Amino acid sequence: MRSTSAATALAVLFSSAALSVVAAGTASAAGTTVASVGGLVVDGTLQRVFVGDAADGRILASDYKGNLVDLNAGFGSVSDLALSDDGSTLYAALPNTHQIVALDPATLDIKRTYAVPTDTGPRHLAFAGGKAWFSYGDQWDGDLGSVDPAVDPASGTDPVALAQVPAEGTGSGLWGQALLDTDPLRPGLLAVGETGDSTGTEAVLDVSSGTARVVAWNDTSYALNDGLGDIDLVAGADQVLVNGSGRHAYANGTLTKAGAYPSGHGADIAPNGLVAQVDGDSVKVYRPNAAQPLRTFYDLYGGPVRWAPDSSRIFGLVRGAGGELTLTALTQPTLNVPTLTVNAPSSATRAKKITVTGKISATVPLPAGVKLSVTRTDLDSPSGKALAAVTVKADGTYSFTDTPPAGGTVTYKVTYAGDAEHTSIYAYDKVAVSRASTSLSLNNNGKLYNYGTDVKFTAHLGATYKNRTVEIWADPFGGDKPKKLVKKGTVNSSGNIVGTVDMTRDTTVTAVFAGDARNAPKTVKVTAYARVKVSTAVTRHYRTAKIGSTSYYWFHKNTDPLLTTTMTYYPGRQQRFDLQVYYQGSWYSMDSEYFPVGTNGKSAVSLGAPGEAGIRVRMRSVYVNSSSGDTVNSTTYGAWKYLYFSN
């Protein structure tokens, strides 16, 4: 926190609270952002833009690029800003504390604080005739005041004067807090626009002597406007511009209509007479009295705009996603933006001639014999290849022919470099140029492999122009394993490339040729299948022995066999337990039941003791695609296990 000694002394002198201020210092590359605008002023000497923040009570200083360079805070609210004619003092109106503060534009330090003896302002500010003029009052009782910086309060004379609207020729005066404007090319004049009712009073006052004198005054209802939201002194004529549109001439003590620009709601006028008109969320630049804009800028806030004193740029604000307003510079405002079109065929055959046409036009006439540069971008020239420049005809049209050497997407970019009155501009169009197909194959489609087999997949690429690279990808079934690049490289002299896949699941294998300038891309897919790994361990038997040629596990008739299956694990997987009994020379199915496979790949099943001797049974474990709970492997049958029950 900081509080300048001058501000504190003056606050005591005028019985007003001292202002606490905060300096941000230099904030490199930080944008200048406010919650709501309370004044916008440009200083050409310092090349600074000052913005008042009405909501947060701050005054911010920006460079010409919009970067924040300084700020001063703690003002409660700021309603308007004005800069002295010599640029030595920045004035700010503080309506909440009824003060006007004078600041050093170079540092934003407070130089002096002026108490304004009113509870309805100050509201708007302008500097003319050596004084800072301000408006105050409510809807039915407005007036003007002034601050004379040449008066030293210690002399006993108050530098602040109220009730400065002239009595003569002003009828009933002002019925609201008036908008104020000055212009360095019209020294000593002050434009006044009444707000607060549906038909605002317009006036031009001569304040060059330090006392306001009526030059022109018009308060006839609806004669000139349907309410005022903006007023500007016109630099090169005895006129004011109202609401960014209506031009009103002043002479012989009154104002009359003198033409209009297309609809707008605010404006600022450059020293060279150019008008920056706010129209919705756009800013249009007009030459004096023109019917068509010289240039249009889009996507702005729609609030106040200000010219740089050298007319090199316009400053406005852009609304962010959070509602904040950020200062932005609109550059090259005096250059007209042409319209340029490019029309190419939507499709074409490679190595066949095509014709590209287009047109360039502008609201400010273009020079005769305009030339446009042309660039073709394609697979052979990804950075672009310059073609012969094309000359525009008198009607703005142009055409050229080209034979695209490469297929694929071909882009024709046409550029106008600009001139003293026009910006540069470019446009482009795309053509889908045909490419020849080539052969690409992949083996092993539909083959079934045991779990864990390393399988070589061979891709074969036919004749191509330049690219001989092929990728082989493996995509195992199931959502838990991503697609994986198995091999990428140049095919051998026979056109082959081999990638090895570990077949632990059913797998889609893809070969990809990306294409080249003359051959189209190609992709082929095959699906190969993998069994699960399955085995069953038998326990609790007392011996193994053959019956005939078949080996059996022998159990006592009252022993319960334990059959433990090991199967490749997958979430939710079950094994099918098949059981058959031998009777009179044939095997008969007794049961097929599914049992879950644990995360360790084990599934143990207790068969139960038959209690009777001479019984022969056999069992096997089976993975059944889909029925076993998933579809990532192919159906796999385990080996039969043979059991015999004896006494």
Image: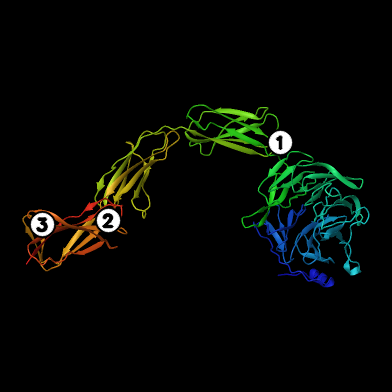
The label nearer to you, 3 versus 2, is: 3
Task: From the image, tell me which residue sits under label 3.
Answer: 582
Q: Is residue 309 above or below residue 407?
A: below
Picture quarter containing residue 327? bottom right
Query: Which mark sits nearer the N-terminus, 2 or 1?
Result: 1
Residues at marks 1 and 3, CA–CA distance in whole angstroms:
100 Å
SS for callout 1 = loop
Q: Name the image quarter holding the N terminus.
A: bottom right
Q: Position of residue 619 (x, y in %)?
A: 16, 58
Q: Position of residue 220 (x, y in %)?
A: 86, 49
SS for callout 3 = strand
Nearest the eye: 468 or 189: 189
Q: Residues within 10 Å of mark 2 (few under 14, many from 20)?
A: some
Q: Position of residue 121 (x, y in %)?
A: 81, 63
The numbered mark at residue 363 is 1
The numbered mark at residue 628 is 2
The numbered mark at residue 53 is none
C-beta proximity under 8 Å, tags 3 and 2 = no
Instruction: Give amino acid for label 3.
Output: Tyr
Query: Which mark sits nearer the N-terminus, 1 or 3?
Result: 1
Q: Residue at x 27, y 54 (%)?
A: 627
Q: Name the image quarter holding the C terminus.
A: bottom left
Picture quarter containing residue 580? bottom left
Q: Position of residue 408 (x, y in %)?
A: 47, 35
Instruction: Give amino acid for label 1.
Output: Thr
SS for callout 2 = loop
Q: Visible in this render: residue 13? A: yes
